[in-house]
Amino acid sequence: MGDDFQNLLGQVRALPRAELLTLDAAVRGLLSAPPPPVPTEQPSDMPGPGPTLSGEPPPEGIAAIEATFARAPECPHCQSKRIGRWGSANRLRRYRCKDCEISFNCLTGTALAQLHKRELWAGHSQALVDGISLRKVAERLDVDLTTAFRWRHRFLKAPKAVKALKVQGTVEADETFFRRSFKGARKLQRLPHKRGGDDAKPGLSDDQVPVLIVRDRTAAAATTDAILPDRSAESIGACLEPVLDRSAILVTDAEMAFSTVANKLEIAHVSLIASKNERSWEGYHIQHVNAYCNELKGWMFRFRGVATRYLDSYLGWHRMNDRDGGTQTARTVLAAAWG
């Protein structure tokens, strides 16, 4: 026992008998009372999430995430499914893994972990549905511009990784180009351009970033894309080879790199020469992928230029919009951000 406890015992022994009896009754009352609640393990098949131990419900939109997680909880650290409840904190249910013994909540290990002001996430999700600029997001939610920027790219981290793993049947592929932008950079790697002016070099050049768009004609219209380091057959092949079904028919323009890739992969290839007014051949065309490119460029225009370093996030954002087909809501965007 420590010195403090020994001193306390000495003070108790010095008390008169009447005060000792009063102290004895008080101690017995404390010992007979139920212990205070502490986080304890509970079986993972308990009822789904509701109000936390504090009685406060989770913020709007988070309840759906918690309910989804509770249906099949998994440890984000070791992927074990032997999970137990472990109280709550910050208006979120906590869990504890019975294998690695680490506690967590439904946001641990996701892009939304450690983000504050969860009560504003539904509003930010709606801003993504509306496709408004960062300044308008900051004004709508009354947050700092840097907060709106950080939230946007955290919310888009998971969607930008969602691409078609396989394209099949009739597959259309084409390139589209975006002006190389150092928007937001403290130091430019070239002389600054006049806003709204022409590129320093006419036509295709290093000032243009090529993006390969690949889209099949299945009912789901599986789509994938890739920012290319250059327009070589090697770069295009590296993007096409993992996703292109070997029984597919690849339809492209007359760019020689596509023919090279098709020959290497030994797949059927239809090449249309626009300079000869070849818009289609026996029902094969690239109108679907061209329409997607045009829609993408028009949608991007609202942002008045996107920094090249963040271009993949905006490509993923547009793919998410395309997959939802106009049915997107704040809840579906928040679920996509959670992953």
Image (cartoon, grey):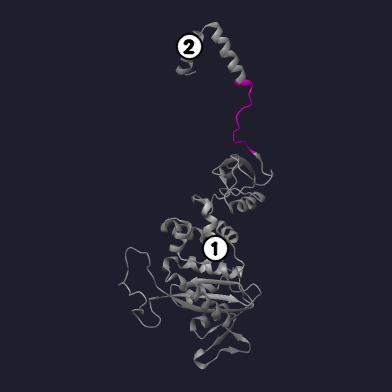
Q: Is residue 126 something one can see in this rendering?
A: yes
Q: Position of residue 333 (x, y in %)?
A: 57, 61
Q: Main secondary structure of the magenta part?
A: loop
Q: Which mark is residue 11?
A: 2
Toward which corner of the image does residue 101 lie, by quadrant? top right
Quadrant where the C terminus sits is bottom right
Which residue occupies 63% across, 38% down?
41
Q: Is residue 111 something one can see in this rendering?
A: no
33 falls in the magenta region: yes
Q: Is residue 36 above or below residue 227?
A: above
Q: Is residue 324 above or below residue 31?
A: below
211 falls in the magenta region: no
Q: Earlier in the sequence, mark 2 or mark 1?
A: 2
Q: How many marks?
A: 2
Q: Is residue 267 above or below residue 64?
A: below
Q: Position of residue 330 (x, y in %)?
A: 57, 60
Q: Position of residue 232 (x, y in %)?
A: 45, 78
Q: Which mark is residue 159?
A: 1
Tell me which segment is drawn in magenta.
Answer: 30-41
Q: Residue furthest bottom?
A: 276
Q: Is residue 309 left or right of residue 108?
A: left
Disc 2 residue type? Gln
